[in-house]
Every structure is written in structure tokens, then in C-alpha cells.
Amino acid sequence: MKLHNLILVLLLIVIPLHAQKNEHYTISGYVKEAISGESLIGVNIYLTDHKIGTVTNTYGFYSLTLPAADSVGLVISYVGFNTENIKVSLHKNIELNISLKPSIILSEVTITADRIERQSESVKMSTVTLQPAQIRNVPSLLGEKDVLKVLQLMPGVQKGSEGSSGFYVRGGGPDQNLIILDDAVVYNASHLFGFFSVFNGDALKSVELTKGGFPARFGGRLSSVLEMHMKEGNKEEWHGEAGIGLISSRATIEGPIKKGKSSILLSGRRTFADLFELPISKSGLPHYYFYDFNAKINFEFGRNNKLYISGYFGQDKYSTNTSSDRFTEKSGYQWGNSTGTIRWNHLFSGKLFSNTSLIYSRYNFNINDKYYDIKEDAHYYAEYNSGIQDYSLKYDIDYIPSPNHWLKVGFISTYHKFNPYAFVEKDEVYNKNIQEKTNEYGIESGFYAEDTWQPHPNLKINAGVRISSFIVEKKQYLFPEPRLTAAWHFKNDIALKVSYSLMNQYIHMLSNTGVGLPTDLWVPATNNIKPQRSQQVALGIVKDFEKKNFSFSLETYYKTMNNVLAYKEGSSFIILDDVTSAAQQNWENKVTVGRSWSYGMELLLQKNTGRLTGWIGYTLSWTPMQFDSLNFGKKFYSRYDRRHDISVVAFYKLSHNITLTGTWVYGTGNAITMPSATYSAFGDNSALGSRGRNANIFGYGEDVGFDYGQKNNFRMAAYHRLDLGIQFKKGKKWGERTWEISVYNVYNRMNPYYYYLGYEYRNDKSYGVIKQVTLFPFIPSFSYNIKF
Amino acid sequence: MKSQNIIFYILLIFTFNISSCRKIASNVDPPEFVQKLVVNAYLSPDKLNNSIFISSNERRFGELTSPFEPFGNVSLYIYENSKEIQFDTVRENYFGSGYNYWIKNFQFKEGYTYNLKVISDLGLEAEATCKIPLKRDFQITVDTTFRKTTEEHGLKISLLTAKISITDFPGEANYYRLLYLYDTYYPATPHKKNLSYKDAVESPIPGWAEYNAWQNDRVSNDIGLDGKKFILRTIEFQPVYLDQPNSSEPDSAFLRIYLLNTDKPYYDFHKSLENYSLGDTPFTEPSFLYSNVKGGLGILASYTLDSLIFRLK
């Protein structure tokens, strides 16, 4: 109740500032896709006479308050849709819902819009927006379409290891990315030990990644916010799509519950290798599968109220069965996320929009082992669990008093329940019955207010503040986080942009892999471990080449990150096949706190329309780190410090039915620690040499040390790869089918996944060598998809 | 049939690819080898003989040398509180990995700072400094208890628990390493009861059998415990004479406890050994060994000793 009052007070302060003296009226409504009734996010609505515009919000809502006029011209444009030109007479408040038609039915690549949103007109910077069509068209490993791997092709976003869906944004670790699906945090975004992300592209409507210049409504992570929204489902008629590839098969169905008013979407995906393996599975063979399921249902209760209920559930499971005439054993591990969101949109007026969300999110990781001793007729069972659960309440208000102001205020409060460790062991032979559990709790809250303000025709500002708070172990952290982005628009198609943001992060992920393994552990800031904090400034220039449909952006950034966590030297992640070792983890003793810096430059040249579309991205960056307990306190480059990173992505529409796609990536090799020499290094084994016989005790077994010089002193070979794909589409009576053939790593580049030390013996001589493991050489794949 | 062929060719391609996944990395140059002297020495006034181990680091890439990288003839210089001292050395080959130089005609002193310089006639140089901690009385006490338990194979055994307490010396940073030894002594003919510690350990009687088990403990420090009495370790072991009723009973049993009061480099080096990781999987990072040797590698550290002999039987 107090929070609600605070927001009302904020509004009461702000609203009079924007009181209109002259007679003004509001045009407001929703922009939807004509065929499905799906609301569209980020649609550009431009007033030709006023040279000013707005965009639709997350729910497709827009609002324009203008002086009374006999004729107001609106141009409504969106990538992939025909532009609509509408004229209205404005002498009263108008409700204007707009339906946009796809530019070419069933073709997502070529668009003909004559005036899409231009980057030079937007105040946003350091933001990447992906269309579902782009995700579908980029050729991928084993044909599995993956939103996170498409994001890795953008400047400032780097992959970790080969094939991994984990991503690093401007030098920040994977834990510094806030990944939210319909407002719910997804803590582990990986299937199959990090090789595929958990997001099914068929169920997604929008994907937006913010790397810097964070608006005040975002908080909780240092490096990026990846905001995804699920499709609402077709409100007009039933449709579906399905596909089968080498790894998984998937199906989506959507349709109206009440035509034009409510709809439902169900989408699922599952690997199938284990299904074929079952009939012939033998003792000792591993079984593995993953699946995920998305569901969304929404209802419209008149113009002013909408209700959305959505959820995600995904699971990976790996197990082995072994048996003999003496015993049977079943062991394995499983992990998964589940999220649920209930959102209520309420329109107070044409200018005042609100959303209330109740959110649940859970991630759990489990290792288990069941053993049965046939001779003794005795059972043994051990289980280790770790995870995190969130319960959140979020309330957001959009107040749009004029085209020059867009105010957003709101709060989010999340109750975190951390379970870094829960262990059960039951042993009938030794009469053991152990049940241990450690839970930690925290309440994370954020209050924000921001305004997107256009004080001058050439200047746009997004300014705001977020008050973030975290209560844990009877301690409260409370910090203000100022945010500012400004864009100066000149020469009609060029904008100079600048941003500053301060972010705090109250929960940490402990990982020394960075590849999104299920053993990564989420833990809170505590009395001893302070919250992470970053400050980032960015400066950029954007130019739109309207005739050629190109846009170009150049950004430089400088980011500092404090209280960053890392495992201490020698500490490692949980051993996957050992339950008791997993139970001996004590995370606070294993971590060290340090600082990190990241700075660099990003270039992006994009072409969004025409037969040939795509982008070229280039990143030049540095990411040094410093920890008191690592590398003897000296600075070193992060493992994923990447001096040069290039991505070239192209889609070419050869004909109405055939699309060629290709990507080429290049990246400086990862910085790793490689020894240059070995030496004898033994502990003090003769401490009692003077005290009697048998003095030669052996306490410290290591007697060969490696001389590394510096941490991450060695660069792996540069990574580069070309992927090509071709899609054949054909219209059928029932809909459309698509065959896709793609090749990953066309020129079979032997990119190293990791190095290890080896020896070669030639002519009675021994040679020390570096050996490498390449994970994915030339790999062809195909998939078959249908839409109906 | 057609679809079976397709599957066959896909499997063939995968098999070919997977088999070609491990190879020598040909497109990277290994880190350059820079030869350095390696020093390994733990000096103590409580040792009758101190030694300094000297060797060279060895190249890891390219043609490897055997038995170790030649590092020439070395000269050792030791400075006590900045004043050069005179001493003799006896050199011995140490397991084929370097040389141990036994220091003769010189005794190290507590509270003194020692600077070691090693110069090889091949032009290699290394230097390190340590300050020997003062001898302290840490008031070691032992509290023992017995309990019976069931071992993994169902055997009933007795366990001896010994709580070893010490009192930290106030006003200084202390670093500890605990060593302990459990000794049992069996009678020979003629039988002699209740062998003294002097007879058992310091001047053993010929023909007596002994069973002893050295145990060493990890290093620790006194952070948050300055000047306090605390339990340093609780150790648990199975006394032989209680669980072998049919064998001959030992004459006497002792728990010998040695507490090393070490300097910080001793602590840091052993701590880095405890946490040592080669990082030999793609998911682990290698860790570094601590070194205080300038221009080289290894460790020059020191300690003094406090001890307690605790009679169990």
C-alpha cells in the first residue's frame, strides 16, 4: 500500500508539470498485426506535420496528445509490415486501434516500408532488437535456432566457448545479464550443458538486448538486460507450426478462445534421441533429453483491461543405469527453470497506462544416486540440490502527457529464496539418515521514475533514477542509481548520443566455466560479500542512409565493475558425478572479490530492407581484471577479453521461395593460462629432520609446479567460421512447408575448444607439445518445418 | 532404402569429423621458455642441518632435456641482517631434479633476517629473503577421549579423539603448521615395561619394534584469534593396541605434537600447494604456486618449533 501511495505522489508531482493550457486531445490505442491480432511492440507512429513521433510500448499501446486540428497525419511503420498512412480530425479524444499487414505474406525478410523507425530519431542507444524472422533465418549448429546465438553476432556481445549459448556483454560475465521472459527472470538459459538456449523461437514475439544506457526501469544486473516477450496467440483463427531437426522436434499451436478478444498459445520442444535409444538401451549407457514448454493465454475485458497469463517450463535430464548380479545403480542429474507470470494491463485514460505483474521463477539443479546391494538387500540413496526461487510483484505506469514527454514510474519487489545446498543421504548398511539444507533469503526491490523528454526538436533525453534495495541477513543495502541518455539529432539523419548508468547487482552466480553449466550457483550478496556495482559511460554516433536503407552506428564505452566475484585459485565447480563432493561446497570460502574494467568501440552497419538484408558488426575491446587473491594481485585479461570480434550476417532472397543465408564470424582467441616451463616445487617434508628417525614425512605431494608467468598469458588461436544455409519454402493447400539445409563451419576450420599439454616421441627424443580439441568441425544439418 | 542411405552417409560424416577432433595445435606458438633458477628452502634454528635445494625450471615445449635443464655451477651467498656469513656446503643430487646444498658450520637464529643470493656461472641469478620467527610457547594442550564406532565393513573399532589446543601469541601475526606422530613400541625379550620416551624415541633399544604414523596438517593462521586459546585441530585415529586384542600389546604409546610457527611465505606457499590445480579440463582454471624468489621460482621460508610429547599409554 505504501508503494502504491509513493507512486501516486510521484505522479501528482509530475502531472501538473505537464498540464496543458491550450485545448489538447489524445489519440491512443493499440497497434496489432492484422492477421493474428497480435499486439506489436516498438511500432513507430510519426506525425508528419509536427516532425515528432512515438512508439508503441511493450503491450502495443501508444498515446499522442496534440493540439486540436482538423487534420492530423499519422504514419505507422514497422519492420516487415506495410506502412499505414492515416489522417484524423482531432477535436476530441480518439481511440484509434491500428492493424498492420505484413508486407509480403509469409515472407519475413523483404520489407517495403517507406519510413521505418530511424535509429537517429530514437534516444535509445546500446540496444539490439531482433525480429523472430532473423532468429529463424540465421544458420545454426545442428539446425537448432537459437536466440542467444543470434545475439552473439551483434557487436558488444561475445560468445564464450564454441557452441555455447552463454554470452558476455561489454566485458561482463554471464551472471551480469538479466534474462527476462514475460517479466520473469530465467536463471539458467541453457540446455545440453550450454550448447543450446532454453528459448523456443517459435514462441517469441520480441527480443531486445540493452547493453548500456539503461533506462531507470531496468536494474539488478551490471551488464545487460535481455527482455523477451512471448507471443500472445492468434486472436482470429487457429494456426500452428511444427518442425523437426537433427536434435529436437517442436510444435506450436495458437488460436482464439473468443475471437478478437482472447487467445491461447502452446509451444513445446523436445529432443528425441533417447526415445529411439530406449528399446535397445544397455546397462551403463547414458540417457539424456531436454524439453521445454511455453504457454500463454490472454483475455481482453473491454478497452481498459487486459489479462495475460504465461508460463515456461523446461528441464534437462541425464541419467545412467548400471547393474550386475550384485547390484543395481541409477544416477544422474537434472536441472530446469520454471516461470509463471500474471499481468494485468489497465488503461486509466488515453494518457495513463498501467501494468501489474505477479511473477514466479524457479531454477533447480539436482544430482542423485540410487544404489541397491542385491546380496545385502540394502538400499543407498543420496541427493544434492541447489537452486533459487523468486516471488515478485511489479507495478509500472506509463504516463504520456504529450509527444514530448513519456513518463514511466513503478516498482518491483522480489522475494528470493536461495538454496545453495541441500543434501540427503540414506544408507541402510551403515544406518545413515542425513538431511541437511541451507537456505538463504533476500528481498530485492527497485523503485524507479524516468522521463523520455524532447525539450528541443533536435534533442531527446531519457533521464531517471532507480532506488534499489536489498535486505539480507538483517542488513539492508540501499543505493540510488542515476541514469541518463541524451541524443542530439542533426542534419536530419545523424544523431550524437551519450549515456551514463550506474547499476547494482545483489545476486551473484558462481561459475568458473562461463558456459552455462547446470552447476553454476546463484547466491546473494551477504554481510561479507557486497553487491556488485558498475558505472558505464557510452558515446555514439548514428547515421541513417535512407535511400539505401542502411543504418550505421559507432559507439565507444567505458565500464567499471566493482565487487566482482570469482572462484579462488584451485576452487572449482561441483563435480557432476559425485554427490558427496557436491555436498561439501561452502561458497563463501571459495570466492574472491575483485574489480574489472571494460572499454572499447563497436561498429554496426545494418541493412533491414530489400532483397539483401543483414549486418556487419565489429567490436574492439579490452577487459582487464584485478583480484587480490588471483594472479598475485596483479591485473590480468579476462578469459573472454577479445580484442577483435567481427560478425557478418546476410540474408538474400533469391526468389519468392528460396532464401540464402550466411554468417561469418571472427574473434581473437580467448586468453588462457599456459605454462612455459615446469619446476620442482615441494612442500616442507623435512620439518622434523632434527628430531628423530623417520623424519622424511610427505605432507605435500605436489612436486612439479608449472611456471605460468601471468594468468591468462596465452592467446588461443583466432576463432573464425563460415555457416551457410538455404531455405526452400513452398505454399501448400494447408499452409506452407520449409526445408532448410545448413552447413556449420563450411571450410572446416579447426577452432580449438580447449588446449592440453602433450608429448611426442621421435627418434628417441621427447618433445613437449600443445594439443587441441576441436568440438565442431564441418557439420551439415537439415530441418523440415511446416506452418498451417 | 533411400532414407537408410542418407542416415548412413550422415553417420559417416559425423564419424569422420569426430575422429579428427584431437590434434597438435599447429597454428599457435607455445610460450617462450625463459630459464630461471629454482630455490626451495625451509630454514629453522630447530633443525640440526638446514639445506637449500637449487635447480632450474625445465622447458615444457620443444625438445625436452634430461635429467634436468643444465644451470651451471652455482654460488650461494647468505646475508644475516645484511652481513655476509661464511659457511660450508655439501652438495648432493636430489632425486635427479637438482642439488641439495647442506649448510655446514652455521646455525640460523630466530628473529634474524636472512637474504639468499644464488648466482650461476651461466649468468642466472635468484634472490630471496626470509625472517625467522621468534620461538614462542604456545601452551599446547591435548584432551583425549575414546569412543567405539562401526567401520564401513561392519567392524567395531575404537577411535581416539585428541583435541589439540594452543594459545596464540598476542600482538603478532602467527602462521601455524601442525605435525603429529602416533608412536607405539612393542616389547622385545627381555621384557621391559613402560619404556620411557627417551628410550623409545631418542635412543631406541635395539630389537624393539615400533609402529608410527606421521601425520601432517595443513597450514593455518591466527586471523580473528590473536592472543586467544583455541582448539587448533581435532584429530581422530585408531590406536593399534586397542583393536588388536590378539596381537601382542604395545609397551607404550605416545602422541608427539609439533607446532611450527612459520613465516608468512611458508604459509602462502603451502596454501598455494593445498589449492593447487592444473586446470587440465576445459572447465577449470589452473592455480599459481606462491613464490618469493626474485628473478627465479620457488620459496625461501622459515619457522621455529614448539612441541609436546603426550603419553597415551
Image (cartoon, grey):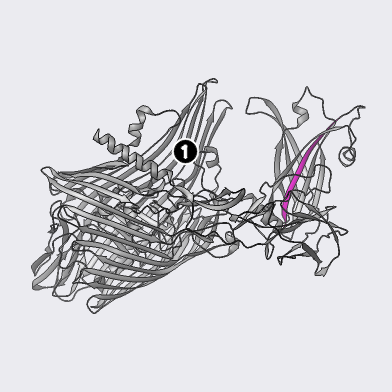
Which quadrant holds residue B131? bottom right
Q: Main secondary structure of the magenta part?
A: strand
Point out residue A762 in the picture as x, y percentages from the top left corner: 58, 49
Magenta region includes residue A746: no
Would you say A4 lies left or right of A728 here? right
Which quadrant holds residue B50? bottom right
**Amino acid at pointer 1:** Ile
Quarter of the N terminus of chain A within the rendering: bottom left
Point out residue B280 in the picture as x, y percentages from the top left corner: 54, 49
Q: Nearer the viewer, residue A245 or B32?
A: B32
Q: Residue at x 29, y 69 (%)?
A: A451
Magenta region includes residue B179: yes
Quarter of the C terminus of chain A within the rendering: top left
In which chain is the residue bearing label 1?
Answer: A
Q: Nearer the viewer, residue B269 or A137?
A: A137
In the rendered view, would you say A588 is above or below A22? Answer: above
The span shown in magenta is B174-186
Point out residue A458 in the picture as x, y percentages from the top left corner: 25, 78
Residue ranking furthest to the front: A763
SS label for mark 1:
strand
In the rendered view, would you say B246 is above or below A162? Answer: above
Would you say A452 lies left or right of A320 here? left
Q: Residue at x 44, y 28 (%)?
A: A283
Would you say A302 lies left or right of B136 here? left
Q: Residue at x 65, y 58 (%)?
A: B290
Residue on which the image places disc 1: A367
Q: Residue at x 68, y 65 (%)?
A: B294
Would you say A396 lies left or right of A33 here? right
Residue A13 in sight in this render? no
Point out residue B124 in the picture as x, y percentages from the top left corner: 70, 65
